[in-house]
Amino acid sequence: MSELRPNPTASAASRPNPAPTSIDEYIAAFSPEVQAILQRVRVTISKAAPEARETISYRIPAFTLSGALVYFAAFKKHIGFYPPVRGDAKLEKALSGYAGEKGNLRFPLDQPIPYNLIERIVKLRVKQNLAKKPAKTRKGEGSSRRSMPSRTASCSCGQLRIRVEGEPRGVGICHCLACQQRTGSVFAALASFSAPFDVFGTATEFVRLGDQGARFIFRFCPVCGTTLFHTEDGRTESVSIAVGAFADPSFPAPRVSIYDSRRHPWVELPPGIKTFDKDPT
Ligand SMILES: [Zn+2]
Ligand SMILES: [Zn+2]
């Protein structure tokens, strides 16, 4: 990675801007065309390694999972991808056309970016990092939080994502007219999770007053319009997330059905589900 370290003498002249503090900030500095590519690289990585965390390292976007996982950066004519791939002869062969000095990868901007290869690289890196996990685990890093399953829900374009840990506190469907209009479907499927949760990307907010006067703050993606999650104003201990955004048909089934009085008559409920005419809370 030494070639990525900022050069102290060159940095003042060629980098007038301070180092970005987030991947969003890094991406925002590029042209819309390059932004779209960087965003897709980022989504490809995070889908291949949902447990990895985003950060900025060596002034460029990085993902970590039991240590450094991958880095990427945009240049005038290519996307750089690091570190060099080792340990999978087939994959290395598939990448040979992109490997530059020291094995670092360069994906030319005037050719299609091989997102499928990026996915394979990330999955290989995850395997390699987890294999050496015991040696890499730093003292003091809690093992309880680390071992909790995590899930990431994403809007349909991938710009806005939320990651939660542990199992949902509750899963329900809501037939209220506001949920029908909000989702465009005839009911909403929502899962509530306890904090902590991590939000990636930019969200626009819409505040709706509930029947009992609570203020619900809905967050939706300003690019594709998915309403991804909402919180109740003043309550940060939990978040409600659109079940469909997990894109996981094995997600736990709903246990409660609320505003059953507004249910379209052709909608059949799963057996054993608890129904409420209105919002019971
Ligand atoms: Zn989106
Ligand atoms: Zn509702």
Image (tube, grey):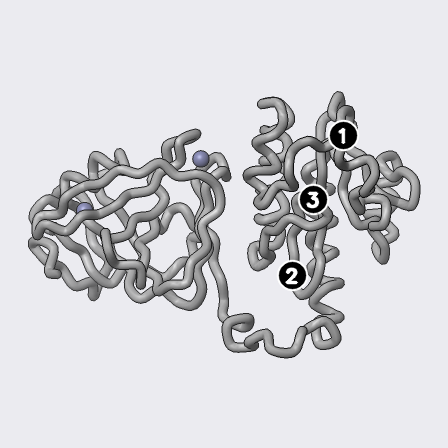
Q: Quadrant of residue 275?
A: bottom left
Q: Which residue is mark 3?
A: 59
Residue extending furthest toward the right: 101
How many numbered marks appear?
A: 3
Question: Residue shown at 39%/39% (left/top)?
Answer: 203
The x, y position of residue 194, in whole percent, is: 35, 65
User: SS class of the residue under badge 2?
Assistant: loop
Give the amino acid at mark 2.
Answer: Leu
Give the amino acid at mark 3.
Answer: Arg
**Marks 3 and 1, the one that precedes in the sequence:** 1
**Marks 1 and 2, the one that precedes in the sequence:** 1
Categorize mark 2 by other alpha carbons within 10 Å: few (<14), some (14-19), many (20+): some
Q: Which residue is mark 1?
A: 14
Q: Which residue is mark 2?
A: 65
Q: Is residue 33 above or below residue 208?
A: above
**Marks 3 and 2, the one that precedes in the sequence:** 3
